[in-house]
Structures are given as structure tokens and as C-alpha cells.
């Protein structure tokens, strides 16, 4: 019989199990404690932080304004913590999450180094049993998954990967002690948001850097800088307004879509607006652009042409500049990487861009990477090859609902949820930031979902309800609405982790809608209405 994975002898079993001690799991734990519930969190890492615990690659940092990113639930915390930079670097973010864990004594309910490999629901008792990688088990009526949409990292499916003689790291598993890259010959695969941060940071230290690019991405300047003491005072004095502003925008960033069409203004006005956005910090150029840039092909073509011009201005070698300009997707139709001197890296003598569409990678060898043209020799390889987004972390566990029904199988084509918080046919499993939820400024999205789920749990406790599940007709209506909300957006026609495509994972070659794209304001209105109407879309008993 497996050993119980919770608490000391004599202690009462948990009423809720949470998987994950990242931003979401920590907040959910805090909230459920407020309800007086016994909660047990299981975390695969050796400490708190989730994304910010694992992703320690050089240059990892926010693209969200730091002062919009932290938890808003504690006014005291907001006054105590000081973000050093407008866009926080990973070490500071991890320090922040440790500060929060210490302040609220969260660790006493978290078991670290405990990866959950399976979860199964017992229909007779309406309890979930989770199994850890060491075989231990734990049981509770409610299971909350706080897995993170980008926690299932993926390695490239290139032959010979294991044969490389030197060290090779995925960016999401960067060694905690750091890596000395000085003078080394480094190869990096990938040119997404992660790769761009890594490349621009390490290019000055390495001996030589070769970037293997399959698809270039549009990228815009981050414009990060330190927060001055005066700004710090101002930020602390205006948190209420900052969070209110985030509540009013469709992505929960401070940036709001401009109500004008690209075609409402003259070419000169358009150029001036884009120059302004290009010169400003953060995601404004992406989510604060003209209203039709992300929905209308002709408007998007103009924005893409502007961005292409910027790349040509910044990269000296015209052939390299052309390779860095995306040709198969328009500006902003994939998650926009923000950069600090990324394009200028390609003006350095020690950096080379290899377009693997021209010279495909054939295999990884003991010495390096063999393309159709030559063998590139390296001391070290970096895989900045991304994640099996959103559903990947669920797929990596064996989750079984009533009658042993597998979630992995149930979601083979596309996930089926109600509000992105309950999966169809999986009672008592509540998801924080699962598929079909609004996503933008992630901690803001998390906070709303955590608070809403806390309300649902409180409702169940108040009324003595042991089991909750979404009504099939509510799931159907929600899934249809989710599809409709994404239909008019140009990004829906483009392959990326946001549309569920990952060519390194079998079966991940079909685009799916994985988020709610009706906007955060609409999402909030809908979930609040469900709670206000007494959760009629659910079956309880
Ligand atoms: P992304 O954005 O998914 O980027 C992964 C990159 O790796 C992308 O350029 C891929 O090219 C490339 N890739 C993946 N597999 C291969 C193989 N087999 N061969 C060559 N190139 C490959 O992940 P990130 O980590 O950069 O960013 C994820 C999110 O984290 C980001 O959106 C932010 O929200 C933070 P492809 O484009 O598939 O051709």
C-alpha cells in the first residue's frame, strides 16, 4: 500500500490539494487558508516560484510592467516590496516570490520536490487521489491544478540529440549555479521570446554565437530602466489606480487598444503614432495599437511593413536583415517578444545567423550541429525551443475522472471546459489558468480566477456540497463562445504555442483555441454573472 504523502501522523487529511507552487498555487493557498481550509500543495521544484523558479536562463525578465505584476491582495505587501526595475529580471522576481512565501508563511503547507504524476477521481466518495513520482499518494475532495500554461518544456526532435559531447541546456532547466559562457562557442536553437532575451544577453560574453532560426519573430524594444526613488514613491501611492487601470483593459496590461482604425488617419499620422509606440516601454505597440492591426489583414500588412523597416534600419547586413523579417505571419499574430538590442547583436562579428530553412539541421553530433551545408562545432548548446503550451502540463500527468476516463484522451482534439476552470466530465477538479481563460498580464488573470474559485469553494462549504461539475450544455455553450471569440483574430491562422502547435510533440500539429479572446473585461463579466446567479451552470451534490 502506498505511503500517504501528507502531514504528520495524527494530522487531519487535507480538504484541498493544489498542484503547483508558482504565482497561482501560492495565491490559491493563501485564499483557501482564509476560508479556514486545510490545504496541501505539491510542487515539483525545490522551492516556490514556478515559472520564475525554473526559467533562470541569462536575460530572463518580465515584459509586463513590474508594478502591474505583483499580487494585489495585500496592501502591506505592496508597500513593503520595491521592484528595482520597470521590467523585473528573473532573480528579483524569484526574490519577490520568496518574500511573499516568507511573509505569509506559505511553505508550511507546501511539499517540495514532489512531482504529481497521476490523479484519479473516486466516483463513490467524490475524492481525488494524487500520486507522486516516488509512489506516495494523497487524497482530498477537491483538486486544484495551478500548473502554469508554460511549464511543459519541449526539446527539439532532432536526431542525435543525446550524442552531443558538451553540456546542453533547455532554457527552462538552466542550472541554478549559472553557466560560464565566457569565450565559449555556443549554438542556440530557437528565436522566440526566450531565445531573444538569451541571445541579446549572452552575445557579448561568448566567444562565438550561432543562432539557428526556423521562424523569425517580430520583436519590439522593451525600453527597460531602473525605477527611481521618486517613481517608487509614486508607484506605491497609486497602486489602487494601477490595478483599476489593468481591470479596464482587455489584456490586463496598462496598455489599451487605440479605438481608431489604421485607415482613420493619414500615413504621416500613422507613422508618428507607430514611432511613438516603438519608443515607449512595454507591450503598447502590440496591445495598444490601432484597433484593426490584429484583426484586419490590410491594417496588419501596414504595421508589418513598418516593423520590417525598423529591422532593416538596425541590422547592417541587408541579407541578415531580410532573414530576420518574418514572412509567414504578420506583426503581433504571435506573442510579441520584447527586446533590448536584439537586432544589433547581428552586427557583431562573433554572431552568426543560420536560417535552417536554407540549410536544414540534419542531426546533432558529438561536436555540434550538422546542417545540410556544414558541421558547426560548439562547446555548449542551448535549446530555447519552447513549451507544449497550456494543455501540455495536463497531458504529462495521468488524470483520470469517473470510470477511469482519461483527461488526455478527452482533450485529444481540443480541450472542453466551462469558463476554462472546470474540464467537462472531471468533477471537483478546478483549474487556475487552464485552457479557455483570458490571458494577458498573467498574475492579474490568475488573481481573478483564484478569487472566483475561492468563491465557488466557499459556496460549496456553506451549503455542504461535496461535488461540483459543469453541466454539459454549459460546457457546449462556453466552447462555442470561445471558438467564436477567437475566429476574427489574425493570430488564429498562425502556428504558435498560443494556437497549440508544437512540432516537437506528436499530435500537436493542429491549431486549437487555447485561450479566451473576448477580452479580460468580458471574461470577468461572464464569470461574475455565473457566481451572482448562484452557479446555475453547475451540478452539485
Ligand atoms: P516559443 O515562442 O515557442 O519559441 C520556441 C522557438 O524554438 C521558436 O523559435 C521555434 O521555432 C524554435 N524551435 C522549436 N523546435 C525547433 C526545432 N526542432 N528546430 C528548430 N527550431 C525549433 O518559446 P519561448 O520559450 O521563446 O517563449 C514561450 C513563451 O514564454 C513566450 O511566448 C512568453 O510568453 C514567455 P518555430 O517558431 O516553431 O518555427
Image (cartoon, rainbow, N blue to C red):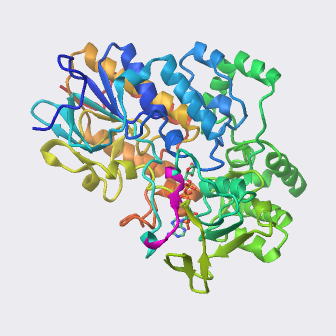
In the displayed structure image, the side of residue 58 where residue 278 appears, left or right: right
Instruction: Identify the residue shown where x is 64% and y is 43%.
Output: 61
Front residue of 401 and 245: 401
Image quadrant assignment for residue 87: top right
Residue 379 is situated, as x and y percent measured from the top left of the image, at: 59, 67
Residue interval drawn in magenta: 163-173
Q: Is residue 72 magenta?
A: no
Is 164 magenta? The answer is yes
**Residue 266 vs residue 60, the one in the foreground:** 60
Q: Which residue is at a point 37% across and 36% down the rendered structure image?
A: 43
Q: Residue 297: x and y, percent?
A: 66, 62
366 on left or right of 41: right
> Relative to 511, is 143 above or below?
above
Picture quarter with ligand 1: bottom right
Residue 110 visible in the shown view: yes
Q: What residue sits 54% from the left and 46% below the top?
A: 55
Q: Is residue 78 above or below residue 390?
A: above
| Quarter of the image that includes the N terminus | top left
Q: Farthest residue toward the bottom?
A: 373
Q: Residue at x 90, y 55 (%)?
A: 268
- Where in the figure is residue 114, as x and y percent of width and height? 32, 38
Task: Indicate the quadrant where residue 541 lies.
Answer: top left
Q: Is 180 or 43 nearer to us in this picture?
A: 180
Residue 526 seen in the current view: no
Question: For this view, does 17 lie left or right of residue 504?
Answer: left
Amino acid at each position: 500500500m502506498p505511503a500517504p504523502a501528507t502531514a504528520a501522523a495524527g494530522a487531519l487529511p487535507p480538504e484541498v490539494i493544489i498542484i503547483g507552487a508558482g504565482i497561482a498555487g501560492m495565491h490559491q493557498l493563501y485564499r483557501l487558508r482564509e476560508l479556514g481550509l486545510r490545504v496541501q500543495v505539491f510542487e515539483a521544484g525545490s522551492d516556490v516560484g514556478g515559472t520564475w523558479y525554473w526559467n533562470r536562463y541569462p536575460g530572463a525578465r518580465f515584459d509586463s510592467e513590474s508594478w502591474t505584476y505583483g499580487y494585489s491582495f495585500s496592501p502591506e505587501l505592496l508597500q513593503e516590496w520595491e521592484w528595482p526595475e520597470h521590467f523585473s529580471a528573473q532573480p528579483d522576481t524569484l526574490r519577490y516570490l520568496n518574500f511573499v512565501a516568507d511573509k505569509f508563511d506559505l511553505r508550511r503547507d507546501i511539499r517540495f520536490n514532489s512531482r504529481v504524476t497521476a490523479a484519479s477521481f473516486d466516483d463513490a466518495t467524490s475524492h481525488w487521489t494524487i500520486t507522486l513520482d516516488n509512489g506516495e499518494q494523497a487524497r482530498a475532495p477537491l483538486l486544484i491544478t495551478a500548473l502554469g500554461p508554460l511549464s511543459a518544456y519541449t526539446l527539439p526532435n532532432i536526431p542525435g540529440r543525446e550524442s552531443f559531447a558538451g553540456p546542453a541546456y533547455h532554457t527552462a532547466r538552466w542550472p541554478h549555479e549559472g553557466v560560464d559562457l565566457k569565450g565559449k562557442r555556443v549554438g542556440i536553437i530557437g528565436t522566440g521570446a526566450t531565445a531573444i532575451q538569451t541571445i541579446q544577453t549572452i552575445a557579448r560574453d561568448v566567444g562565438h554565437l550561432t543562432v539557428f532560426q526556423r521562424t523569425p519573430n517580430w520583436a519590439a524594444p522593451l525600453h527597460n530602466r531602473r525605477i527611481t526613488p521618486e517613481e517608487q514613491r509614486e508607484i506605491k501611492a497609486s497602486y489602487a489606480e494601477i490595478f483599476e487601470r489593468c481591470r479596464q483593459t482587455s489584456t490586463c496590461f496598462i496598455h489599451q487598444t487605440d479605438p481608431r482604425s489604421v485607415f482613420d488617419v493619414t500615413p504621416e499620422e500613422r507613422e508618428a503614432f507607430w514611432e511613438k509606440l516603438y519608443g515607449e516601454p512595454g507591450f503598447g505597440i502590440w496591445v495598444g495599437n490601432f484597433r484593426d492591426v490584429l484583426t484586419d489583414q490590410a491594417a496588419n500588412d501596414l504595421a508589418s511593413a513598418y516593423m520590417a523597416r525598423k529591422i532593416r534600419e538596425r541590422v547592417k547586413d541587408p541579407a541578415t536583415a531580410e532573414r530576420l523579417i518574418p514572412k509567414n505571419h504578420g506583426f503581433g499574430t504571435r506573442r510579441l517578444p520584447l527586446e533590448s538590442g536584439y537586432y544589433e547583436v547581428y552586427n557583431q562579428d562573433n554572431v552568426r545567423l543560420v536560417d535552417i530553412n536554407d540549410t536544414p539541421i540534419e542531426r546533432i553530433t558529438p561536436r555540434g550541429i550538422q546542417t545540410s551545408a556544414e558541421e558547426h562545432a560548439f562547446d555548449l548548446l542551448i535549446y530555447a525551443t519552447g513549451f507544449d503550451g497550456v494543455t501540455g502540463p495536463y497531458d504529462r500527468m495521468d488524470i483520470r475522472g469517473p470510470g477511469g476516463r482519461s483527461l488526455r484522451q478527452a482533450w485529444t482534439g481540443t480541450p472542453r471546459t466551462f469558463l476554462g476552470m472546470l474540464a467537462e466530465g472531471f468533477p471537483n477538479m478546478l483549474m487556475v489558468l487552464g485552457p479557455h481563460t483570458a490571458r494577458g498580464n498573467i498574475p492579474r488573470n490568475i488573481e481573478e480566477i483564484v478569487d472566483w474559485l475561492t468563491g465557488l469553494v466557499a459556496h460549496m462549504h456553506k451549503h455542504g456540497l461535496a461535488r461540483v461539475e459543469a453541466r454539459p450544455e454549459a460546457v457546449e455553450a462556453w466552447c462555442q463562445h470561445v471558438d467564436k471569440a477567437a475566429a476574427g483574430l489574425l493570430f488564429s491562422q498562425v502556428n504558435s504555442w498560443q494556437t497549440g502547435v508544437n512540432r516537437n510533440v506528436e499530435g500537436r500539429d493542429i491549431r486549437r483555441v487555447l485561450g479566451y479572446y473576448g477580452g479580460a473585461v468580458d471574461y470577468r463579466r461572464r464569470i461574475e454573472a455565473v457566481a451572482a446567479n448562484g452557479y446555475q451552470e453547475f451540478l452539485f451534490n
